[in-house]
Image (cartoon, grey):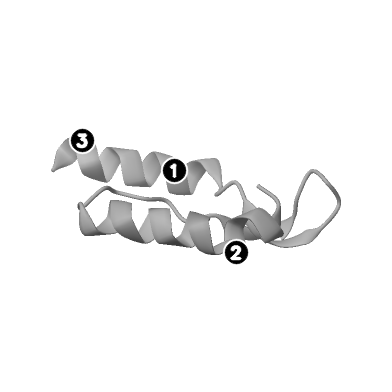
Amino acid sequence: MNPNMWNHPAVQENINKLKTWNVRFVEPEAGPVACGDTGYGRLAEIDTIFRAAKDVLEG
């Protein structure tokens, strides 16, 4: 995701709404993104996503 998209108020509002519903959410990481920009919006490392999924499945 482009950092400008990630920082958009509508995206942040929707993320916060999901969190109030106790939806598990893996935050993006900072770094270069596909469009050449740098900032938050980069897909989290696969290991981070895997650990989060494993935590959900193991309860």
Q: Earlier in the sequence, mark 3 or mark 1?
A: 1
- Residue 57 badge: 3
- Which secondary structure, mark 2? helix
Nearer the observer, 28 or 18: 18
Task: Answer with left or right where residue 58 lies relative to residue 25.
Answer: left
Residue appearing at x 47%, y 61% in the figure: 12
Work out whether 22 lies above or below 57. below
Task: Answer with left or right where residue 13 lies relative to residue 58.
Answer: right
C-alpha separation, residue under disc 3 versus residue under disc 1? 12 Å
- Residue 7 badge: 2
> Residue 4's image quarter?
bottom right
Residue appearing at x 59%, y 46% in the figure: 43
Total count of labels: 3
**Residue 40, image x and y in percent?**
63, 62
- Residue 49 badge: 1
**Residue 7, image x and y in percent?**
60, 64
Residue appearing at x 29%, y 49% in the figure: 24
